[in-house]
């Protein structure tokens, strides 16, 4: 039995994690889990990942991969047997249409896909832009004075000399 977790207390005490909580709440809403086609998800390196889907019987033309708004969608649809030459006595190889979605984290991009031995291999990499990476701030003498101009008090348009004369 699945119970829903309430993230409200965490939402009140955190800043900037709204998207994460939304993803977690939406992930628990899907009750009907389809396990077809089976897949493996592995970490290949520090910022590299690989998804391997078992798509035996599907050709490259029958598979479709696309990324939209941070969601990788892999779908497959078998072409109809137009020849009619084959007479199937038993169908044990899965040929049903499928659609599998993967929510990608920020800065994760698809690097490539390959179909080998009935396995669809999708390589992913996480590339954080240089501006978003943490950087070390050196402590030194390169301080720019922000408040270099003297503060003027008094009436607008009255200079320091006219205030001192008054």
Image (tube, helix red, strand yellow):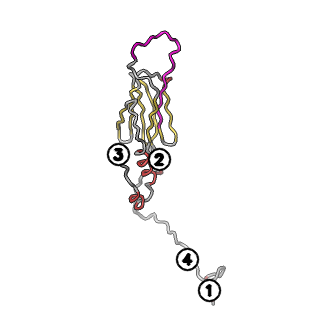
| Residue extending farthest right | 157
Q: Earlier in the sequence, mark 4 or mark 2?
A: 2
Q: Nearer the viewer, residue 10 or 130?
A: 10
Q: Position of residue 9 (x, y in %)?
A: 39, 60
62 and 60: which is toward the camera = 62
Mark 1 Cα-neighbour bin, 10 Å: few <14, some 14–19, many ≥20: few
Q: Which comes sooner in the sequence, label 1 or label 3? A: 3
The residue tagged 4 is 150
Tell me the element at label 1.
helix
Distance from Cα at disc 1 to Cα at disc 3:
75 Å
Residue under pointer 3: 2
Mark drawn on residue 163: 1
Disc 2 residue crowd, few under 14, some 14–19, many 20+, Cα 10 Å: few
Query: Which residue, as the protein is rendered here, is positioned at the far left?
Result: 1
106 relative to 44, above or below: below
Residue 44 placement: quadrant: top left
Residue lying at 46% horizontally and 11% vertically, measured from the top left: 86
Which quarter of the rendered picture does the C terminus lie within? Answer: bottom right
Label located before the other in sequence (1 or 4) = 4
Q: CA distance from mark 1 to mark 4?
A: 14 Å
Q: Mark 4 and mark 1 in contact (Cβ < 8 Å)?
A: no
Could you tell me which secondary element the residue under label 3 belongs to? loop
Above or below 44: residue 78: above
Tell me whether circle 4 and circle 3 mark residues in contact (CB < 8 Å).
Answer: no
Q: Which residue is mark 2?
A: 129
Label the magenta part by its dominant secondary structure.
loop
Single out the mark in the foreground, 4 or 3. 3
Q: Is residue 87 magenta?
A: yes
Under tag 4, what secondary structure?
loop
Q: Which residues are magenta?
A: 72-90
Residue nearer the viewer, 101 or 60: 101
């Amino acid at each position: 039995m699945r119970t829903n977790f309430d993230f409200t207390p965490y939402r009140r005490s955190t800043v900037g994690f709204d998207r994460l909580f939304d993803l977690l709440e939406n992930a628990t809403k899907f009750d009907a889990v389809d396990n077809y086609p089976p897949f493996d998800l592995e970490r290949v390196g520090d910022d590299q990942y690989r998804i391997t889907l078992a798509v035996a019987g599907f050709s490259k033309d029958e598979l479709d991969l696309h990324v939209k708004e941070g969601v990788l969608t892999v779908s497959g649809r078998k072409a109809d047997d137009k020849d009619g030459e084959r007479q199937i006595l038993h169908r044990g190889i899965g040929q049903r249409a499928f659609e599998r979605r993967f929510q990608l984290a920020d800065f994760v991009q698809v690097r490539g896909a390959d179909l080998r031995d009935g396995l669809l291999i999708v390589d992913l990499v996480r590339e954080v832009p240089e501006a978003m990476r943490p950087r070390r701030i050196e402590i030194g003498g390169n301080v720019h004075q922000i408040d270099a101009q003297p503060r003027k008090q008094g009436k607008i348009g009255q200079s320091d000399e006219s205030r001192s004369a008054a």
